[in-house]
Structure formats: structure tokens, C-alpha cells
Image (cartoon, helix red, strand yellow):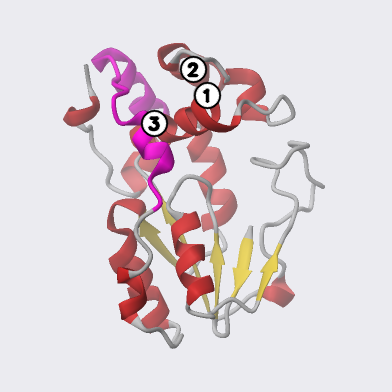
């Protein structure tokens, strides 16, 4: 989903803090309209026209921003979101190929189905349109920086009223990776790890 502001556009990559960002922008009255396109990675159909793009040229702005997330925490959060909260979507390609109630089996399936990295394919679908890319791990500071760059009016006191939305984080906080599996996943997502300087996270290993 893309969200149009006065001087910028926010591209929402799933499971990277975008729900919180959208809540803050809504509370601040910054949202002009939602630009809803078919997303081949998260849509119910799992397909899109060959000329599909997440942002049409006529909807673009000087500042286009989005957020990425460490692969190890992204997959853990995604699994918790689907397996413990909303269920697997049989029309979504990732869910159809990899969905499993057991986290370890889910990751094995991801590595087998996407040996070059699912995020390495999905992130650029959004980020190739961006002028600015923040990190989930620095969400609030990067978000404020992008609003300032775009000259979007914003009352920082709103941040105290809207706490982080950590529902899937709460469901996944006890999930750990076997070391060997984490290494395999990081290798599969090596392009993302190198691009955004993501290293191994010892605190989520068994």
C-alpha cells in the first residue's frame, strides 16, 4: 500500500513498522489519500499485471520513503503474524509455498523455495521507487527525519500518544533460530544484509 502526503509518499512494506507509521500519520492528519494497488507479494491473489508498479508516476512526490527490517526478525514476525494471529493465505505465494505451524519448518521451506532470498526479491519492489529508506530498528528517528526532509508539518508530541504496535512481536518474542538455520537464511538474504548492513543477531539464536 502507498500513502500520499502533501509533499511525500510512504510505501508500506509489510512487517517493517508501517502500521505504526500509518497510525501516526493518520492521527497527525497528514494522509491525503491511500494509493491502493495490487501487490503481488501480499495481495489475496498473489499476482499482478506484468507492468505493475507499487507507485504510479502521476502519484509520485519529491520524497518517497519506506522502511526495511532485519531478515531474521522479519521472518519471525511474519510467521507469528500468520501462524498465531491471522492464518496462512492460500492465494499468497509465500504462504502457499512456506506456511507451516512450526517456525523451524517454515524457515526451512523459505530457504528451499527462495534460495536467493524472498526479501531480496520483495524489498526492491518497493525500495526501487524510494528516495529515502529507513530501518525498522531506527523507526521513529528515521520517520521523523523523512517528515522533516519533506517539510511535512508534524507535532512530535503525538509520538507519546501512539505507542509502538507490537502485537506480532509479542507472539514471536520467544521464538529462536538454530544457529545453522539462521546462517543459511542470512546467506540466502545476503544481498539485503549487505545493502543495509545487517549482521547476525545472537539474541534470537538457540
Above/below status of 26 relative to 184: below
Q: Is residue 42 magenta?
A: no
Looking at the image, tell me whether mark 3 or mark 1 is earlier in sequence order: 1
**Mark 1, residue position:** 83
Query: Does residue 183 appear left or right of residue 98 in this picture?
Result: left
- Res. 125 in view: yes
Of tags 1 and 2, the one toward the viewer is 1
The image's mark for residue 171 is 3
Camera-nearest residue between 4 and 52: 4
**Relative image position of residue 161 (x, y in whole percent):** 35, 69
Q: Which residue is mark 2?
A: 106
Evaluate if marks 1 and 2 touch, with contact meaning CB atoms under 8 Å apart. Answer: yes
**Residue nearest the viewer, comparing 46 with 162:** 162
Whole-angstrom CA distance, mark 1 to mark 2, is 10 Å
Rendering quarter of residue 9: bottom right
31 is higher (above) or lower (below) than 175 = below
Residue 191 can be seen, yes or no:
no
Tell me where the magenta segment starts and ends, as one range: 165-189
Q: Secondary structure at mark 2?
A: helix
Q: Position of residue 73 (x, y in %)?
A: 35, 36
Using the numbered discs, state the Cα–Cα distance from disc 3 to disc 2 in whole angstroms.
16 Å
Name the residue: 17% across, 28% down: 202
For the C terminus, the quadrant is top left
Q: Residues within 10 Å of mark 1 (few under 14, many from 20)?
A: some
Distance CA(mark 3)–CA(mark 1): 10 Å
Amino acid at each position: 500500500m502507498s500513502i500520499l502526503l502533501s509533499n511525500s509518499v510512504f510505501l508500506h512494506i509489510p512487517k517493517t513498522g508501517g502500521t505504526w507509521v500509518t497510525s501516526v500519520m493518520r492521527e497527525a492528519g497528514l494522509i491525503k489519500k491511500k494509493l491502493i494497488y495490487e501487490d503481488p507479494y501480499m495481495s489475496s491473489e498473489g499476482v499482478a499485471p506484468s507492468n505493475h508498479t507499487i507507485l504510479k508516476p502521476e502519484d509520485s512526490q519529491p520524497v518517497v520513503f519506506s522502511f526495511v527490517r532485519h531478515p531474521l526478525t522479519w521472518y519471525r514476525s511474519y510467521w507469528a503474524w500468520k501462524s498465531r494471529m491471522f492464518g496462512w493465505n492460500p492465494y499468497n505465494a509465500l504462504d502457499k509455498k512456506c506456511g507451516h505451524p512450526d517456525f523451524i519448518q517454515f524457515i526451512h521451506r523459505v530457504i528451499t523455495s527462495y534460495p536467493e532470498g524472498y526479501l531480496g526479491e520483495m524489498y526492491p519492489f518497493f525500495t526501487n521507487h524510494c528516495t529515502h529508506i529507513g530501518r525498522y530498528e531506527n523507526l521513529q528517528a528515521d520517520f521523523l527525519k523523512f517528515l522533516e526532509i519533506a517539510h511535512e508539518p508534524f507535532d512530535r508530541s503525538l509520538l507519546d500518544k501512539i505507542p509502538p504496535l507490537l502485537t506480532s512481536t509479542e507472539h514471536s518474542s520467544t521464538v529462536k533460530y538454530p544457529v545453522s538455520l539462521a546462517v543459511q537464511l542470512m546467506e540466502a538474504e545476503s544481498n539485503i544484509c549487505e545493502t543495509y548492513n545487517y549482521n547476525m543477531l545472537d539474541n534470537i539464536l538457540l
